[in-house]
């Protein structure tokens, strides 16, 4: 099976670790991007082809502090770039498809 997978990963997140383990159980060695250390830019976020609201963690303190509830997609993506803690996790990408792997088993949609 091709290993053209990328996971935007937070090693402190149990869901992210579980999604990575599911990939490995399927003999997939994804490129692992720790997005808190290497945040994606706006073009990368757009390439996921997912609504901005699916990409943002609305339970983070920054979400409330930045008053993001009524913001546009462009404003949400800019906020994620500036505050990568807001990025939903994990995001798994294969080719031109991406899923927010919550629950982690959603990663199997890309297999």
Image: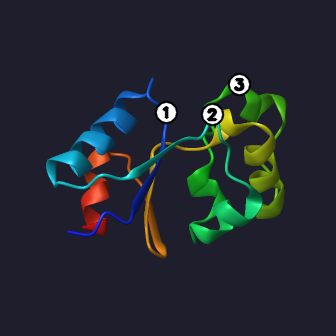
Q: CA distance from mark 1 to mark 3?
A: 17 Å
Percent across and percent down for residue 86 are 66, 38
Q: Earlier in the sequence, mark 2 or mark 1?
A: 1
Label 1: element kind: loop
Report the residue at 31% width, 63% height from top.
3
Of marks 1 and 3, the one in the foreground: 1
Q: Nearer the viewer, mark 3 or mark 2?
A: 2
Q: Residue at x 74, y 55 (%)?
A: 41
Disc 1 target residue: 10
**Looking at this view, is 4 or 87 the one in front?**
4
* Snapshot quadrant of residue 5: bottom left
Q: Nearer the viewer, residue 67 or 48?
A: 48
- What mark, if any, has residue 61 been given in the picture? 3
Label 2 sits on residue? 36
Helix, strand or loop at label 2? It is loop
Q: Is residue 22 left or right of residue 73?
A: left
Q: Residues within 10 Å of mark 1 (few under 14, many from 20)?
A: many
* Residue depicted at x 65% and y 33%: 85
């Amino acid at each position: 099976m091709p290993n053209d997978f990328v996971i935007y990963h937070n090693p402190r997140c149990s869901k992210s670790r579980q999604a990575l383990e599911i990939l490995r159980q399927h003999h997939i060695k994804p490129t692992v991007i720790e997005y808190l250390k290497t945040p994606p830019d706006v073009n990368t976020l757009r390439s996921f082809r997912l609504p901005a609201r699916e990409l943002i963690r609305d339970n983070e303190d920054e979400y409330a502090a930045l008053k993001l509830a009524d913001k546009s997609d462009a404003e949400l993506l800019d906020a994620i770039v500036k505050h990568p803690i807001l990025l939903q996790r994990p995001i798994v990408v294969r080719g031109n498809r991406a899923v927010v792997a919550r629950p982690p088993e959603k990663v199997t949609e890309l297999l």
